[in-house]
Every structure is written in C-alpha cells, then in structure tokens.
Amino acid sequence: MTAKIISGTEVAKEIRAELQERVTKLKAEGVTPGLVMIRVGDDPASVSYVTGKEQACEEVGIWSETYVMPESASEDELLAKVAEMNKAEHVDGILVQLPVPKHIDADKVLNLIDPAKDVDGFHPINVGKMLIGDPYFMPCTPHGAVELMVRSGNSPEGKHVVICGRSNIVGKPLMAMLVQKKPHANATITVVHTGTKNMSEITRQADILVAAMGSAEVIKADMVKDGAVVIDVGVNRVGMKPSKKDPTKMVADLRGDVDFEAVKEKASAITPVPGGVGPMTITMLMMNTVVAAERRAARSKK
Ligand code: GUN
C-alpha cells in the first residue's frame, strides 16, 4: 500500500480562510485581534518559527508585534514585558517563544501570562481545564494534529491511538484531548516513551500512530501496522540543503520523527515534514487569537 499524503498546508489554508471571515466580522465590530510575541535570543529555529507566525497573522488579518530581547536579557526584564502585555487592552494573545535562555525559569514566565491571553495553552490553569474536559485554550501543536486527523477523514473516535513521546507541549496534552468523551476524541490511548521496554510491539497495535519524540526518522516501517494512519509531529534540523525555490540559497534540512520513505509504503495515510503538522500548529495559534478577540468583543457588548 502507498499512503495518501495528508497535506497540512492544504488543511491549514482551509482553516485560515474560515478565520479570515471571523476576523472581518470582528473588525466590523471595531475589534482587531492582536498577538504579541516575545523572543529572547537568536536561536535559528525560534527566529524561523516567529517569522512564520508573523506571516500567518498578516494573512489572516491579525495585528502582531514581536519584541526581540537579547540572549543576555534578565528574567525580571522578561517578566516585566509579560506583565505589561497582560495589562494592554488591545493585546488578545501573548506568546513567549520557547526555549528561553537557561538563566530564565520558563515556568515562572509561562505562569505569569494571563490565562485569558495564553494562546499557547501552556498555563497550568489552561492545562488543567483541558484535562477535566472544559478547555479554554488548547495547545496549538496537539490541537493541530487532531484537526488534521479529523479534516482528512481520519477521526480518532473509537481508534487505538499510540502517542510516541510524553512532552508537555505535545504528548501529554494530546493524550488529554483524545481521551475525552467527546466528538473527535473518545479514543483509546497508549503513550510510549523512553521508559517503554517493548516499544515496537505497542506501536504496531496503533490504528493512528503519532510520532512526537523529537528524534529524526526513528519510527521505522517495522514499527507500523499495515494501513495505519501516521501523524508525524517531529521537526528535526539535520543540516542545511539548497533551497528548492532558489538553489543558490541554503535552507534547513528538516526531517520528521518518521522514516517517511519507508513508512509511506505501509501506512494508509501519512503527514509529510515539512508541510504536515507544522502549518497546522501556526494555524491553531491564529485560531486561539481569534477566539480571544471574540471573547473581548463579547465582553465589550455587556
Ligand atoms: N517552541 C516550540 N514549540 C513552541 C510552541 O508551540 N510555542 C512556543 N511558545 N514556543 C515553542
């Protein structure tokens, strides 16, 4: 079997068109959705992610501003910027790009973001609300992965979903989302991780296999059941390569957590890297920002 390629780029385009309409409606009511991003230091991956998010804001009609702080910025300076943005009326969403430099306590920063502006869905209050089935903002990458499953006709309902990886950004929240007794969830979940002894025995039982370990091409064909749906959340930079658009320019060589060429011969559907979950993550950030602005518009009518 050769797998159907699930295009995150296409699904993201569809959702962004829906968001554009919601933004047009908000603007007619006098509310422009606003997202503030804070980047500390010049990590190349972070620079690229933040640029992608700025471009998506522009496309959807969201106002955005990025504060770039030097690598040497103190924790207090970053906390002060977050506190200032918490108070700013026109700011619907605040995002601190991770990772932050080692001398800054990331949890302390994330905990200071007003949960009502936490469009990343990382604040413990929002994590807890999601876990009890009353989500306020859902984290963008796992939410994007679920939307991609559903909109490509691969709903997780009633399926055995095996999640590889237990990070706070992907594995754990995805587990919390899919276990809910709700439409587009209600799945049986297994999480495998570095402490799992018989990993491939378990991954071979997956109807839907989600790879989110952060290691390049570690999911091999013999770990996948015939006809499984494979969602690759990994973004690993393995080096540089000439750009397809302009071969005189070098760009990052991105690989997923899945050995794509081999696994696509076994799966029924698979997401590519790039062009799979990545564009969905950014789109879910746009969605959360629009939702936050819609809540602001509703408050102003009261
Ligand atoms: N770094 C890697 N992924 C993310 C994300 O989803 N949000 C933020 N803020 N930083 C990240």
Image (cartoon, rainbow, N blue to C red):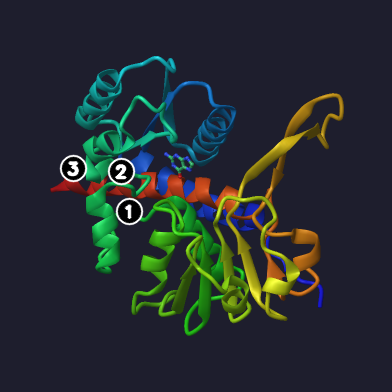
Quadrant into which the N terminus falls: bottom right
The CA distance from mark 3 to mark 2 is: 20 Å
| Real-space CA distance between mark 1 and mark 3, rounded to the nearest whole angstrom | 20 Å
Position of 108 with respect to 223 (left or right) is left
The image shows residue 129 at horizontal and vertical percentages of 24, 60
The disc label shown at residue 300, or none: 3
User: Which circle's residue, 1 or 3, is located before the other in the chain?
Assistant: 1
Q: Nearer the viewer, residue 33 or 47?
A: 47
In the visual, does 130 lie left or right of 225? Answer: left
Q: What's the amino acid at mark 1? A: Phe
Residue holding disc 1: 137
The disc, 2 or 1, on the residue closer to the chain's N-terminal end is 2
Helix, strand or loop at label 3? It is helix
Q: Nearer the viewer, residue 30 or 84?
A: 84
Image quadrant in which you'd find residue 102: top left
Q: Residue furthest front?
A: 197
The answer, for residue 21, to whether it is visible in the render is no
Residue 106 at what x, y percent from top left?
33, 35
Disc nearer the start of the sequence (3/2): 2
Question: Which one is in front, 22 or 165?
Answer: 165
**Is the C-beta separation of discs 1 and 3 under 8 Å?**
no
Q: Measuring from the top left, give residue 264's x and y in whole percent.
A: 77, 67
Q: Residue at x 78, y 27 (%)?
A: 250
Residue placed at 41% from the left, 67% from the top?
Answer: 175
